Image (cartoon, helix red, strand yellow):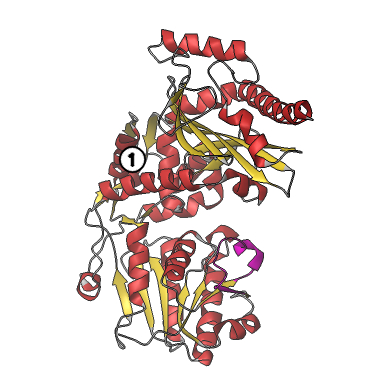
Amino acid sequence: MTPRGEVLVAGATGYVGGRLVACLERERVLLRCLARRPEALAGRVAGSTEVVQGDCLEPETLAPALRGVDTAYYLVHSMGSGRRFATLDETAARHFGQAARTAGVRRIVYLGGLGAEGEAELSEHLRSRQQTGEVLRASGVPVVELRASIIVGSGSLSYEMVRALVERLPVMVCPRWVRVRTQPIAIDDVVAYLLAARDLPEGADGVYEIGGPDVVSYREIMLEYARQRGLRRWLVPVPLLTPRLSSLWLGLVTPLYARVGRKLIESLRNPTVVTSDRALAAFAVRPRPLREAIARALSQEDAELSATRWSDAFSSAALPSPWGGARFGTRLVDSRARVVAVPPSRAFAPVRRLGGSTGWYCGNALWRLRGALDLALGGVGLRRGRRDPERLRVGEPVDFWRVEAYEEDRLLRLAAEMRLPGRAWLQFDVKPLGASRSEIRQTAIFDPAGLAGLLYWYALYPIHSLIFGGMLRGIAARAQAEIVGEG
């Protein structure tokens, strides 16, 4: 076992970097993160983690960050910066490698991309990823380069692009690249490889190709994702969509990926499969199959959703709330808050009385109409009411909702059981603001099932905004009125 010294993560604000940092913190290593904007990591790292300002394109900022570092993780790329991304990546890697050599870093661990090395038709993106590894090795510092294909996990750009297409398009016109073979790997397995790379023996540097056990096409990935989401999708192959036309089409259907879409599409034309068993021989990691990787990604999103305190997430400005709501994985999130001059126990009292004979503090006639429609469609309607007008327990019904989480005077989360093209939750968080003031935050969360779910959300968003906004005002008014009544 190699002696463990200080660890630096360059690229900690990225998708893989953030997951890696969380795992390193759990292992209680001496950890340092390099960031161009340290404030971007505020609240995302533990207090024991040191965050230093630095930019790989400004070499003078790297020496302080690398001083005393044993292992440096290099997870930096510039694909979102425009046409010059390959040049910027090469420059950044050269600066980082030189600074690491000067600082006496024992090992650099780098995550690159799979693709046949030296292939004439290799995309600019994949060629740049491999060139970055070569530049780091040229510094003279031993480099462990892990090469992966599509990473399956919420937040991975390739996975999110595939998911966005499947979620939004019942029928997809698919160019040639959807039949290209790839070897997807779960994000948890990528992080496991990154962690284990730190403990490889001296002399074990070099390139390791990593991937799950399944060699599949992008078409098969899309269909497996659709199967697990309960979506029926038809993929119509066409020979005419060039990478440029595909990227324009992608930008139209999924605007979030328009900026990097062309680079990604050009990469998808290259097979990205493991051709060496060196990683399996050197590492104890055994990656999970595609079906399990997608299932785990979806279940982790549910766990992250359940653990999120929306009062903290929105108040820290981590999730802005534009028209139509903010996105959280596949979910659409609409949140609003009101401050009341009462302690949390008083602020929460109207929340715990929701439903049943109390009603919903706004638009009760509309709630009854929604219940009647639900009943007509074979749903549960409003006839269940609630067990007790004052007390709630996890698992019991509240009209056509069910209590999924409950913390006295702090949290109520209701899961919808009415007929919907997706899944829905309504959550209330109460947060103390001093001795006699509280914030009541109401958050509506919707996980749309395909295009029908998206149409439902956006078509009814103005009505939901009026009802939910009125409900929150009614809750706040009731909490304040009870204090006045007692006075």
Image quadrant where residue 472 sits:
top right
Q: Is residue 310 visible?
A: yes
Relative to 76, 345 lies left or right: right
In this view, the residue in front, 193 or 314, is 314
Residue 215 position (above or below residue 170): below
All told, the count of numbered labels is 1
Toward which corner of the image does residue 99 lie, by quadrant? bottom right
Graded by Cα atoms within 10 Å as few (under 14), some (14 to 19) or many (20 or more), the crowding at tag 1 reads many
66 sits to left or right of 25:
right
Query: Is residue 387 one of those drawn in magenta?
Result: no
Residue drawn 62% across and 63% down? Answer: 42
- The residue tagged 1 is 225
Which span of residues is magenta-colored? Answer: 35-51
In percent of width and height, residue 174 lies at: 36, 38
* Relative image position of residue 24 (x, y in whole percent): 44, 70
256 relative position to 201: left or right = right
Question: On screen, 313 above or below 141?
Answer: above
Q: Is residue 322 visible?
A: no
Q: Quadrant of the N terminus?
A: bottom left
Q: Secondary structure at mark 1?
A: helix
